[in-house]
Amino acid sequence: MKIATYNVNGINGRLPVLLKWLAQEKPDVVCLQELKAPQEKFPENELLEAGYHAIWLGQKSWNGVAILTKDEKPKVLKTALPGNDDDSASRYLEVQLEKLTLVCIYLPNGNPAPGPKFDYKMNWFQHFDAQAEVLISSGKPVIICGDFNVIPTEKDVYKPEKYIKDALFFPEARKAYQEVLNQGWTDAIRYLFPDKTIYTFYDYFRKAYERDAGMRIDHFLLSPSVLPYLKSGGVDKEVRGWEKSSDHVPTWIELKEF
């Protein structure tokens, strides 16, 4: 099973890129973030024609998450982060795929920081930490993936000294991410490539993609019962170079059959 996560940065505007990538790479399951489309404007028919069923939480202008599957639609478990019901942003989608629980998240960016947006990010992180603890304590196979808006370590960003004042690299955000890992989750991409420079995001400015000046902020967290089935993983970096592409690149893992 090949599972991918991809912040599309506007699903309707980037639909040709998404469809081209789906046809080329043929992932079995895709978690999408930053749909930037209200519920009724999601391109369900186009994705069905491409061979993918979809469950989505739309939102006008910003946010939004979705899960695409080749087989039948998974069972929806949660459409909001537990304990954070007052948050109107579409950022959390939890489903059941046979034996696997799959969570798609779009964690808040937090910039400019410090300030209200960073406070919102850390509050969301607090609720997410609690839900991650519930999920891993179940002992069941669980994968959490998406755009975490966190640069975990210095080796996950080009010239880390340039990001000292960025909410994605603030010590508080990195500590919160590490506290989730400390529950027993495995950062799948870093596990597979402990020493390799891997980026999942390249800014639109200053030819960041051409200079390979990126950061790694899209992650897969695997529960202990999933880790033995991890077969491979990587990023489809070349997609960032396609015309009108997202500033993120698709990130994926492949699992052996449970």
Image: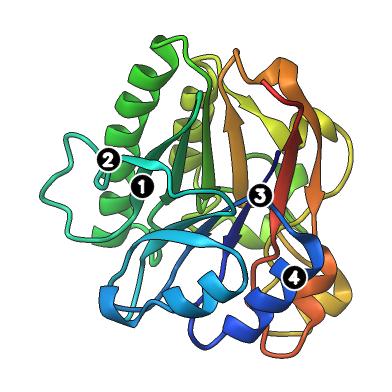
Instruction: Quickly name the residue at label 1.
Output: 93
**222 or 101: nearer the eye?**
101
Badge 4, how many Cα within 10 Å: few under 14, some, many 20+?
few
Q: Nearer the viewer, mark 1 or mark 4?
A: 4
Residue at 27% x, 79% y: name it: 40
Work out whether mark 1 precedes mark 2 in sequence or the reverse, and give the earlier one: 2
Instruction: Specify the amino acid type for callout 4.
Output: Ala
Query: What is the residue that sits farthest to the left in this orientation?
Result: 86
Badge 2, how many Cα within 10 Å: few under 14, some, many 20+?
few
Q: Alpha-carbon distance for marks 2 and 3? A: 21 Å
Residue at 38% x, 58% y: name it: 110
Q: Alpha-carbon distance for marks 3 and 4? A: 11 Å
Instruction: Quickly name the residue at label 4.
Output: 23
**224 or 217: nearer the eye?**
224
Instruction: Specify the amino acid type for callout 3.
Output: Asp
Give the quadrant of residue 152.
top right
